[in-house]
Image (spheres, rainbow, N blue to C red):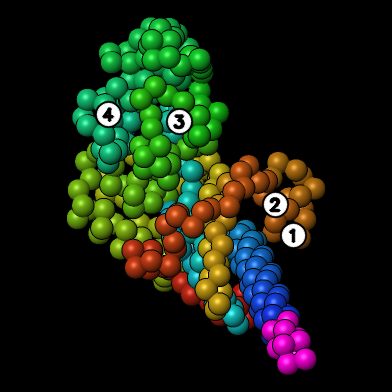
């Protein structure tokens, strides 16, 4: 009888242990699901805030006073909401280097900071020229059909203008590290052989021939001061590019980054241009005035707009209610 009671006690203990394990496992599973659900909710909220940053930028670009209109020269604007901050950086494509129109000298300047040796930089410039020209003649150190075949590639140069900056990755000798270095500096939308200096971001101005670091820093400071105080854009210190921004191609890149108080983050990059639709131009909605050419979500590895370096480009901060006035 005692032996049976002992066996029953052991069975009860085993059952209790099993139930405890099951309960713990269930609780852990529920915590994980709750954490995942909260993460999805926070990411969705951060994405919505980042999207609102794009919409606000489109609205501020419609300010009838050109001196109060948000600047498209790489300037950054910040909106502070109740539980989030959003920063928007505006970059005019006319202030970038057009890989379809830039001459050899400007392309060589573009390659200054590429993480490859000098010989490879020259090869890349020549290969870019061979890709976009209409003939099969090979530039010195360049690459046409035969060179691509010899490299074991199943394609050849398009012999026409680049359709997107991503196409640059197909050029013989181009690798991911070089492309990522060039990506923020280049465009296929400006349609001009020169850079519009008054719209160029600091990263691009540093590549323009004839400008030294002190000149770039001085001009950026002067331009930032003009934006802060709603003054006209100052003339650039060099004739290497175009100075007058009036009448330029109006394609823009907007980068919007949202940071919530719970540390969730989302970044959206959008390429937009004024809408060709007459009905849209008569619409009261700012968003209807623009056509989206490209829309993408940035990754966690992309440079944040909330870094110390980006703080130097911050023009204005707004409390959310200020944008309603």
Vertical side of 15 occupied by 90: above or below: above
Q: Is the residue under label 3 in contact with that under label 1 (CB below 8 Å)?
A: no
Q: Is residue 111 visible?
A: yes
Name the N-terminal-most of marks 4 and 3: 4
Q: Residue at x 35, y 57 (%)?
A: 234
Name the N-terminal-most of marks 4 and 2: 4
Q: CA distance from mark 4 to mark 2?
A: 41 Å
Q: Which residue is outermost to the bottom? A: 2
Looking at the rendered structure, the secondary structure element under dot 4 is helix
Q: Is residue 254 visible?
A: no
In the image, residue 273 lies at what x, y percent?
61, 45
Q: Is the residue under label 2 in contact with that under label 4 (CB below 8 Å)?
A: no
Q: CA distance from mark 1 to mark 4?
A: 46 Å
In the image, residue 16 lies at what x, y percent?
71, 84
Number of other residues with Cα within 10 Å of mark 2, as a class: few under 14, some 14 to 19, many 20 or more: many
Q: Is the residue under label 1 in contact with that under label 2 (CB below 8 Å)?
A: yes
Nearer the observer: mark 2 or 3; the answer is 3
Q: Residue at x 20, y 48 (%)?
A: 212
> With 185 as the anchor, is 267 left or right in this view?
right
Q: What stretch of residues is rendered in magenta?
A: 1-11
The residue that label 3 is drawn on is: 169
Q: CA distance from mark 2 to mark 3?
A: 32 Å
Q: CA distance from mark 2 to mark 1?
A: 7 Å
Q: Quadrant of the N terminus?
A: bottom right
Nearer the observer: mark 4 or 2; the answer is 4
The residue that label 1 is drawn on is: 285
Magenta segment includes 35: no
Vertical side of 307 occupied by 131: above or below: above
Q: Which is more toward the observer, 132 or 283?
A: 132
């Amino acid at each position: 009888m005692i032996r049976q009671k002992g066996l029953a006690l052991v069975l009860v203990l085993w059952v209790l242990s099993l139930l405890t394990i099951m309960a713990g496992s269930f609780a852990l599973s529920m915590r994980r699901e709750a954490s995942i659900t909260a993460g999805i909710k926070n990411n969705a909220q951060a994405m919505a805030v980042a999207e609102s940053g794009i919409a606000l930028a489109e609205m501020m670009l419609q300010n009838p006073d050109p001196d109060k209109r948000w600047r498209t020269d790489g300037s950054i604007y910040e909106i502070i909401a109740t539980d989030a901050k959003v920063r928007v950086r505006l970059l005019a494509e006319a202030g970038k280097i057009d890989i379809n129109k830039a001459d050899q000298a400007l392309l060589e300047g573009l390659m200054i900071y590429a993480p490859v040796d000098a010989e490879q930089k020259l090869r890349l410039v020549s290969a870019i020229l061979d890709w976009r020209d209409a003939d099969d003649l090979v530039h010195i150190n360049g690459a046409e059909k035969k060179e691509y075949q010899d490299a074991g590639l199943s394609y050849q140069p398009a012999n026409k203008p680049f359709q997107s900056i991503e196409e640059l990755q197909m050029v013989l000798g181009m690798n991911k590290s070089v492309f990522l270095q060039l990506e923020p500096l280049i465009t296929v939308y400006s349609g001009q052989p020169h850079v519009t200096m008054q719209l160029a971001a600091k990263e691009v101005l540093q590549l323009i021939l004839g400008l030294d670091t002190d000149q770039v820093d001085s001009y950026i400071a002067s331009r930032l001061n003009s934006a802060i105080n709603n003054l006209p854009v100052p003339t650039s210190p060099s004739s290497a590019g175009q100075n007058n921004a009036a009448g330029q191609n109006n394609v823009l890149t907007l980068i919007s980054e949202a940071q919530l108080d719970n540390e969730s983050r989302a970044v959206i990059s959008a390429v937009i241009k004024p809408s060709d639709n007459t009905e849209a131009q008569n619409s009261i909605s700012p968003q209807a005035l623009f056509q989206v050419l490209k829309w993408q979500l940035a990754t966690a590895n992309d440079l944040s707009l909330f870094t110390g370096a980006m703080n130097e480009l911050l023009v204005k901060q707004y409390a959310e209610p200020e944008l309603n006035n």
